[in-house]
Image (tube, rainbow, N blue to C red):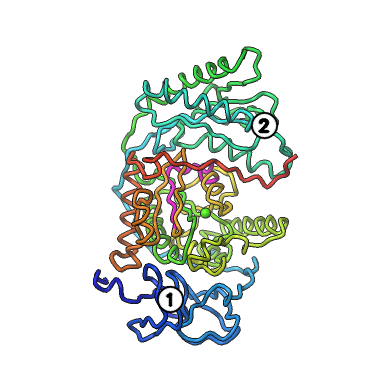
Amino acid sequence: MKTASTANLPLFIRMHDNDNVAIVVNDGGLPAGATFSCGLVLREAVPQGHKIALRALAEGEQILRYNVTIGYAVRDIAEGSWIEESLVRMPPARELINLPIATRIAPKTDPLEGYTFQGFRNADGSVGTRNILAITTTVQCVAGVVEHAVKRIKEELLPNYPNVDDVIGLEHSYGCGVAIDAPNAMIPIRTVRNISLNPNFGGQAMVVSLGCEKLQPTRLFPKGSIPIQNGGDPVVVCLQDQQHVGFESMITSIMQTAKQQLATLNRRQRETCPASELVVGVQCGGSDAFSGVTANPAVGFATDLLVRAGATVMFSEVTEVRDGIDQLTSRAANADVAEAMIREMEWYDNYLKRGGVDRSANTTPGNKKGGLSNIVEKAMGSIVKSGSSTITGVLAPGEKLTQKGLIYAATPASDFICGTLQLAAGMNMHVFTTGRGTPYGLAAVPVVKVATRNELARRWHDLMDVNAGRIASGEASIEDIGWELFHLMLAVASGKKTWAEHWKLHNALVLFNPAPIT
Ligand code: CA
């Protein structure tokens, strides 16, 4: 372990012995002439997180990071040079044929026993980490009314129900003006349905509908969708009902219905639950070159701990794992799981192609500023969030989990859409890594944010929950941060507030709608 006195010496991190590039660790980058302990001298100034050539590279030669070809040298590159984005030619995507199927046996590990948290157990067996009244909407038209009602409910009713944490409106842009019979319309529809059944909402569903919308409540919740309530039907307030005369009568109806729901939710009590009841969605946003060095490997370590404890972990973001498909299919529990992953990747390849782009549309200006040259490099750093366990299941976008273990939940990489789809799958805890920094949060589940760099963790000290930057500076190991995150997840699941919850920061639900709009 390096001491603080060495922290300012020029440092790079090489991910694999075969790599011919490494990234600069030091905050603020390094000047030309900086000399590393191995004798390598920088030929030019290199920003933090950016790649340097560890040896001379010939034009067309493979650029290796993570022992993976992340690109080819556009021209000859001298040792000690900054390998900035324009010097890297991106390789084509791996074809989805002849992939290794279930070839890798996961390292044998003992079950992790004895870890618990205080959660809200639901009648269907799922466990919530928060106790929230959620008001589902069938169409965007009602959003303003619901927002107004939620404010009133929080001010006038919620204080009387001390066991209920919050009241939220599940607002979205779907419901009307859409081709609701298009085959892909099932994705946004099942997403709204399954979010309404998230474990943090206690298995109840209260719906505010307009009345004339395409997404009728009976279509959103076919008979029996809500097993424990009202004979399987949601409780619905319809704004166009004749009984509503004026705005105030709509608000009164919503508040009266909410009162009954709050009374039921208020009877929920936290009880001791095994860690196996955690359902964790992991994702990254605002990634940099450290994402794959510090935060994501620490999340991967915690993922393995959770899987050993019998819990469920979902990793997602199709374009950020697409270039590592061979790693994933080889880790599949069986051929069915591998084929389901290939099917999801193929569907997404075609979805992007219809829009006239490919997976390279993923990287952002911030990613590139943070040192990530292309989606291949980004994906290699992103995929490590999945740890090393066997992948036991695959979900299509908007589907609900039916099993435990390590699950590939296919979603876009967009932070809000990924989070929304993981909510629909049934997550009760979200772990989010960031290098550039984002104040991301969700109203429905706690979001634990992990910073990839010390500098970000210092600047955003009251927004980041875990600082994985200490791995790069040598103050902590991947295992240390992985365990810290694991323990923090149990505390947060038991009610400890994350920074996003402290400041009440949350982003909108954003549905994935690959179907046409009318
Ligand atoms: Ca993301």
Of pointers 1 and 2, the one earlier in the residue sequence: 1
Residue in front for this viewpoint, 377 or 405: 377
* Mark linked to residue 175: none
Which residues, given as a range, are shown in magenta? 421-434
Specify whether residue 55 is in view. yes
Where's residue 178, x and y in %? 71, 38
Disc 1 Cβ-to-ligand 1 distance below 8 Å: no
Where's residue 407, x and y in %? 50, 53
Calculate the distance from the C-alpha at mark 1 to the C-alpha at mark 2. 52 Å
Mark 2 lies on a secondary structure that is loop
Q: Residue 422 in magenta?
A: yes
Disc 2: which residue: 215
In this picture, residue 428 sits left or right of residue 322 = left
- Is 90 situated above or below 132? below
- The residue depicted at 36 percent of the width and 44 percent of the height is 498
- The residue depicted at 35 percent of the width and 61 percent of the height is 454
Q: Amino acid at mark 2?
A: Leu
- The residue depicted at 67 percent of the width and 55 percent of the height is 347
In this picture, residue 34 sits left or right of residue 235 = left
Disc 1: which residue: 16
Q: Residue 155 in magenta?
A: no
Q: Amino acid at mark 1?
A: His
In this picture, residue 350 sits left or right of residue 429 = right
- How many discs mark residues in the rendered view? 2
Residue in front for this viewpoint, 399 or 476: 476
Q: Are marks 1 and 2 in contact (CB under 8 Å)?
A: no
Would you call the spot at circle 2 few (<14 residues within 10 Å), some (14-19), or many (20 or more)?
many
Where's residue 517, x and y in %? 72, 41
Residue in front for this viewpoint, 74 or 487: 74
Would you call the spot at circle 1 few (<14 residues within 10 Å), some (14-19), or many (20 or more)?
some
Residue in front for this viewpoint, 96 or 142: 142
